[in-house]
Image (cartoon, helix red, strand yellow):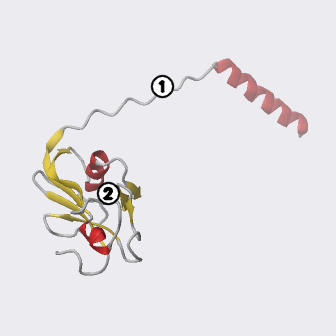
Amino acid sequence: MTRKLCLIITIALCLLSACGPVSVMPPEPAAPKERAGTVSFEVSAKNAVNWGKDGLPEDGGLFPAQSVPLLEGDSVLDILIRTLPDTENRSGYVAGILGLREKDCGAASGWYYYVNGEAPLMSAAKYYPADGDVIRFLFTVKAGDIPY
């Protein structure tokens, strides 16, 4: 039994060495995404300022409303990360934007996003906006402090 096992291992090693080195080609770079339009994009932490959080602009405007590119296949999270790369996200859950993190202003505080004034019932990673949509990330401190 031991001789058969040694023979099998020897044959396998000979076959592997006879094949020579295996080269692995790097993957082709992804083609750049095509532009699909623009969206209005804004990030506000007004509620955190009202709560007394220091180090924020007086009006809470972390990223004033402006037009940003919408690329083919973009989710709301893709737009957020491309526009503000310092975003902290956990598998689609936005935990922090520009250093303001969930629970920084109490246990119930954190980020919500809205598209055209409505809060989608899915993560920002799964919502795909359309050309012309209005996307707002708003920081909440307590229930009812966001006007929608």
| Image mark for residue 125 | 2
| Residue at image coords 26%, 34% | 32
| Residue at image coords 24%, 67% | 46
Sequence order check: which comes first, mark 1 or mark 2? 1
- Front residue of 143/56: it is 56
Query: The C terminus is located in which quarter?
Result: bottom left
Q: Position of residue 37 (x, y in %)?
A: 12, 45
Drawn side of residue 8 relative to residue 66, left or right = right
Q: CA distance from mark 1 to mark 2?
A: 30 Å
| Image mark for residue 74 | none
Drawn side of residue 28 relative to residue 15, left or right = left
Element at badge 1?
Answer: loop
User: The disc labelled 2 sits on which kind of residue?
Assistant: Ala
- Front residue of 37/110: it is 110
User: The disc labelled 1 sits on which kind of residue?
Assistant: Met
In which image quadrant can residue 124 be found? bottom left
Q: Position of residue 116 (x, y in %)?
A: 13, 64
The number of numbered discs placed on residues in the rendered structure image is 2
Reply above or below: 125 against 50.
above
Reply above or below: 5 against 94.
above
Instruction: Tell me if mark 2 has few (under 14), some (14-19) or many (20+) residues whose alpha carbon lies within 10 angstroms of its own.
Output: some
Query: The N terminus is located in which quarter?
Result: top right
| Image mark for residue 25 | 1
Q: Residue furthest bottom?
A: 143
- Front residue of 16/5: it is 16
